[in-house]
Image (cartoon, helix red, strand yellow):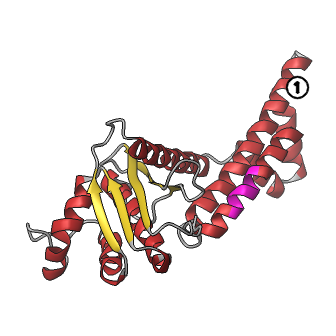
């Protein structure tokens, strides 16, 4: 969320973090978090851009997003301090990045640097930012309130991404049946309807009807959320507005069931 810095905010301190479940597996799911302070509207739970989902990539994207913020508002800032529990990000920022560039994005073993799409932008921002940027390492899960808050945002983003994937992979059965009915001849529709199981208990039938309606409402919102997640990196501000609208629509859908 691209909110303006506070008028007195010449020094800005943020915490970044990443969260990943199934790290190293093809089905891994990750998210990033950037924390500005208690109840700060800029606190952000971020979906990863295209590419593999890994813990390092999630940590790096959180750092990149924070640097983008500093670049956007650099005329109002003098010093920008980023706290991260990622040794990967801190060491790369302090030591490895110049060497990678000198070796044309090869690491010390002669292999291509991982996450180059993100590191390229980090390197560009490092060169052009007219702000004193400091990247400080903080021990993770050590009861540091800023780190814990950034971690919570990253976990929230990871869970949102996981829910969107599950919704996309499991479209509602009713949709598939209705699509099949649309092209079926009248005799087939009648036969399908006659073969549907009939409940002997009216109350049970009413329950299943209500449950199906609730399921359809939730899945519709989940599909719309998945589309929103896919577009958030290109326009975060519009995505945030659309998310608020979707939240209200979901409430209305549930109330109408």
Relative to 54, residue 101 above or below: below
Q: Quadrant of the C terminus?
A: top right
Q: Which residue is mark 1?
A: 206
Seen at 80% across and 44% down, the residue is 251
Membership of 242 in magenta stretch: yes
Q: Nearer the viewer, residue 162 or 90?
A: 90
Instruction: Say which residue appears at 40% left-offset and 47% top-offset.
Output: 19
From the viewer's side, name the closer residue of 111 and 39.
39
Indicate yes or no whether the magenta region holds residue 136.
no
Location of residue 156 in the rendering, given as x and y in whole percent from the top left corner: 52, 45
Tell me which corner region of the image, top left, top right, bottom left or bottom right, holds residue 136: bottom left
Q: Which residues are magenta?
A: 241-247
Q: Please say whether residue 112 is visible from this viewpoint.
A: no
Image coordinates for residue 128, horizontal then vertical, percent = 35, 84
Examine the rendered structure and indicate whether residue 68 appears above or below residue 89. below
In this rendered view, identify the residue nearer to me: 14 or 231. 14
Classify mark 1: residues with Cα within 10 Å, few (<14), some (14-19) or many (20+): few
Horizontally, residue 30 falls left or right of residue 179, namely left
Instruction: Determine whether the residue tagged by mark 1 lies in a helix, strand or loop.
Output: helix
Q: Position of residue 30 (x, y in %)?
A: 42, 50
x and y percent of residue 207 in the render? 83, 24
219, 19: nearer the viewer: 19
Q: Is residue 197 above or below residue 173?
A: above
Q: Residue at x 58, y 64 (%)?
A: 1
Residue 251 in sight: yes
Give the farthest residue toward the left: 109
Left or right placement of residue 216 versus residue 163 in this view? right
Furthest-front residue in view?
8
Rendered residue at 34%/53% (across/down): 54
What's the magenta bit mostly, secondary-structure-wise?
A: helix
Position of residue 181 relative to residue 194, above or below, is below
- The residue lying furthest to the top in this view is 201
């Amino acid at each position: 969320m691209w909110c303006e810095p506070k008028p007195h905010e010449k020094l800005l301190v943020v915490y970044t973090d990443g969260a990943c479940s199934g790290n190293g597996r093809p089905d891994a799911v990750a998210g990033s978090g950037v924390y500005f302070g208690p109840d700060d509207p800029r606190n952000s739970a971020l979906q990863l851009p295209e590419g593999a989902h890994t813990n390092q990539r999630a940590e790096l994207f959180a750092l990149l997003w924070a640097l983008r913020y500093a670049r956007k508002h650099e005329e109002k800032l003098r010093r920008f301090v980023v706290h991260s529990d990622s040794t990967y990000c801190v060491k790369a920022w302090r030591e490895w990045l110049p060497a990678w560039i000198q070796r044309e994005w090869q690491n010390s073993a002669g292999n291509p640097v991982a996450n180059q799409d993100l590191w390229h932008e980090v390197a560009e921002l490092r060169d052009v930012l007219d702000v004193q940027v400091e990247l400080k390492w903080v021990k993770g899960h050590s009861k540091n309130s800023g780190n814990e808050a950034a971690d919570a945002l990253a976990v929230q983003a990871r869970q949102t991404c996981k829910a969107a994937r599950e919704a996309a992979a499991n479209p509602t059965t009713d949709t598939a049946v209705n699509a099949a009915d649309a092209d079926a001849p009248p005799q087939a529709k009648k036969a399908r309807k006659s073969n549907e199981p009939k409940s002997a208990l009216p109350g049970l039938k009413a329950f299943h009807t209500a449950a199906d309606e609730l399921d359809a409402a939730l899945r519709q919102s989940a599909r719309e959320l998945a589309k929103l997640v896919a577009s958030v990196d290109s326009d975060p501000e519009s995505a945030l507005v659309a998310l608020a609208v979707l939240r209200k629509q979901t409430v209305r859908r549930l109330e109408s069931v």
